Amino acid sequence: MKNKVIWLGLSFLLVVAMLLASCSTSSTTSTINATNTTTTTSVVTVGATVLTVTEGSTVKTYSMADLQALPSVSGNGGSKGKGGTITGPFAYQGVALTTLLNAVGGISAGETVTLTSSDNYTQSLTYDQITNGNVNYYDTTGNPVNPSPKPTLTVIYSQNGAALDSTHGPIELGALSSQNILTDGSLWAKMIVKIDITTGTTNTTTTTVTTTNAVTTTNSTATTTPTPTTTTAVVVAPPTTQVATTPVILTVVNGNSSKTFSLAQLQQLQTEFTQSGYVKGTAVGNFDSYVGVTLKTLLDAVGGFTTSNSVSVADGTGYSKTFTYANVENGTGFTILDNTGATVASPQPAMPFLAYSKGGVILDSTLGSLYLGFASNTSLNQYTQSSLWIKNVATVTIIAAQ
């Protein structure tokens, strides 16, 4: 009996031990299945070169920070595919293609710009397409339109305020406007890494002129002189787009000389697309879309504006505001306010610009042909004081140092 009790006790202990071992095994062999999530946002190493622009022996390289430090273009853009598929429009930000081309000497008639992507896809653009904007445009339903002003060809680095994803970026080519305008999908070159300006051949016609020397003979031996052939290349200039020079809406004065501009001539300059607004007293005005030209671009076009100069912007009655070289060239020195009217530190310049379009249409008579404003950024809600803004701008005067 005693042995039986001992045997039952040992059996009980054995069962308990097995149960404990089973529990221990269960706790150490359980696993957690993790799901890996892959993001497609382009990741660019700080300082890494994302773009190289070349013309002949002139080469400029840009990191993403370099591109973002240049004057920016903000606007809407979208595309129409060969099968009629509509993509966008979306809100983009980038750098005007002409800004990058001008940094290496600019593009001339007869030259071609070739954009190369990281997968070696190439896209070529002509002088006419770049300078005159002569590409196909469509509305958001895909029907052809002829927008005015033309959208700006832009090297884009952000969409809806975020970096481009890896299937498009870190940069791509697009056409941006304050309107919802589409262009051909083939125009939108993705993943651009290189831009080259080369001499084109499409605008050149070669005519061959052959000159044959006379045959020379003597009484004893007839000798034929070799016949050289001279080829003269005759370059036929491409058709020039006529730009209306009247009516004059702006006069730029520099000392004893002056230069006048019509609306069409201003639209030929580098375009500025911006969202901007002002604060008047305690009232915060609307944040509107504008298209125009910066004072910097305008003065660069006429020349003669240096660090020792200032500039006066006046309406037709003589009311004016004067700005320093730093105000115009760097967009600094202005009081920046947020959408509550509170003064804030500006994270980016507020560039003075002359708008000729608001909300996608030419300015009405209350604002005049040109309206002085200050380029801002939609996401930052940067406002300036209303006292700086001028309606009915008629004259810009470069003032020499006293």
Image (cartoon, helix red, strand yellow):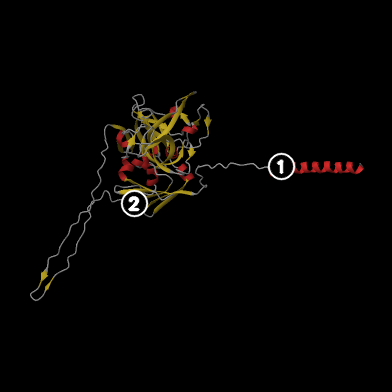
Residue hosting label 1: 26
Mark 2 element type: strand
SS assignment at label 1: helix
Q: CA distance from mark 2 to mark 1?
A: 71 Å
Quadrant occupied by the C terminus: top left
Work out which residue is located at the far left of the displayed protein and give it: 219
Q: How many marks?
A: 2
- Quadrant in the rendering for residue 84: top left
The furthest residue to the right: 2
Q: Earlier in the sequence, mark 2 or mark 1?
A: 1
Q: Residues within 10 Å of mark 1 (few under 14, many from 20)?
A: few
The disc label shown at residue 294, or none: none
Give coordinates of residue 25: x percent, y percent: 72, 44
Residue at 30 percent across and 37 percent down: it is: 258
The amino acid on which the numbered mark 2 sits, given as a three-letter code, is Thr
Of residues 109 and 36, which is closer to you in this image?
A: 36
Disc nearest the viewer among 2 and 1: 1
Residue 292 point in image, percent of width and height: 37, 34
On screen, residue 14 above or below 279 = below
Asked whether residue 262 appears in the rendered view, the answer is no
Q: Residue furthest bottom?
A: 220
Residue appearing at x 39%, y 31% in the figure: 290
Residue under the point 64% across and 41% down = 32
The x, y position of residue 250, in whole percent, is: 32, 33
Q: Nearer the viewer, residue 344 or 307?
A: 344
Which residue is farthest front? 1
Q: Check disc 2 and report the residue beneath it.
A: 198
| Kind of residue at badge 1 | Ser
- Quadrant location of the N terminus in the rendered image: top right
| Res. 198 in view | yes
